[in-house]
Image (cartoon, helix red, strand yellow):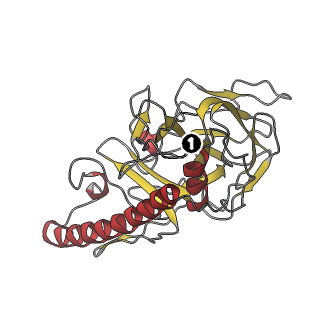
Amino acid sequence: MTAGRLQVRIVDDRDPDIILSASSSSQSSQDWNRNSSGSKNEFMYTTSFTQTGGATVTHSFVGSFIAVYGTVSGDPRTTKPKSRCSIDGGQHSVFEASESGYHIKFYESPVLPAGHHTLVIENMLEGGHLWLDYLVVISIDTNVPPPLDGPDSPSRSSHPSSPTSCGHGATTSSDPRVLGIVSGILGLIIFIGVVVTIAIVIRKRAKKRNHPTDQGMLKDWSSGRRFLSTEHDKMSFGDESRYGITNTANDTGTERRSSLDDLSILSASTTLRSNITIDENRLKQLLELDRVSTGPSMPIIRDHKSSPGNPSDGRV
């Protein structure tokens, strides 16, 4: 297998390659709602909604990893979602929401053999409010040239390790190159945390001077892209009562719960925001699977084929 670089692709819920299907019992075109716009806190301002038991999502992709993110309403009048996901018709993984918020991870696949795969998501509860926001696909960019080995370097096996089930840790390796890559990524995570801390301090000082309103978190801090290490987004601006998610913004800034246990990538601009967490063990497995030679950061491709809508109320 040719060595390459990890490539992260964000697939919005409005992407035509995401197929929303009615339940087999109803066959109603109203099982999924894609007509209403989402919140400012959701990727590309959009989500797809269903409360029909048996409604499904299907997405075919090329890669070695996929994760599913959505919104969970905190409105006590709604039923939290219960869904199950499977890859290539294999074993199901059940997700039952225990908390509300944006960018909630519904599913994270094991490390998969590089190639074509199919993800299927099913809403298990009739009346369960399932909001799909986006998918994250990680693949190997084989266009990146492999590192040069010396003439006396031993050949490396081209056989990938077998996929592991969710929850199992990564296998250890004594390969100095793999250990170096993992150490570099962990160092990058720590560096990101330091940068985020400095950025938050600067932003809080700017808020005290300028007294901004709810537009602050949608402004770019530098070039329009940020890399943060956080858990799921807990902030809310404007009228988000339809979700029942608490607004934690105040005069001293927006509260955030930081974590370096997961690798989190947050891409932000005036038109889109996304918070992605990838389990560290999954990342190590991906690195070992293909002996990836990667740079100081992973490229992000925002895969959106439609323009963002304007946030509106009344979806729930």
Can I make out residue 72 in this image?
A: no
Return the residue nearer the eye: 173 or 297: 173
Q: Is residue 40 above or below residue 237?
A: above
Q: Is residue 243 above or below residue 189?
A: above
Q: Residue furthest left?
A: 209
Q: Secondary structure at mark 1?
A: loop
User: Percent x, y for residue 18?
Assistant: 60, 29
Q: Is residue 122 left or right of residue 116?
A: right
Q: Is residue 149 left or right of residue 88?
A: left
Return the residue nearer the eye: 128 or 89: 89
Q: Quadrant of the N terminus?
A: top right
Q: Is residue 151 left or right of residue 81?
A: left
Residue at the image point whose x is 30% and y is 46% from the top: 269
Q: Which residue is mark 1?
A: 155
Q: Residue furthest bottom?
A: 252
Residue at the image point whose x is 21% and y is 48% from the top: 223
User: Percent x, y for residue 139?
Assistant: 54, 38
Q: Is residue 285 above or below residue 115?
A: below
Q: Residue furthest right?
A: 25
Q: Residue furthest front?
A: 152
Residue at the image point whose x is 13% and y is 70% from the top: 209
User: Percent x, y for residue 172?
Assistant: 64, 62
Q: Is residue 173 left or right of residue 5?
A: right
Residue at the image point whose x is 44% and y is 25% from the top: 305
Q: Residues within 10 Å of mark 1 (few under 14, many from 20)?
A: few
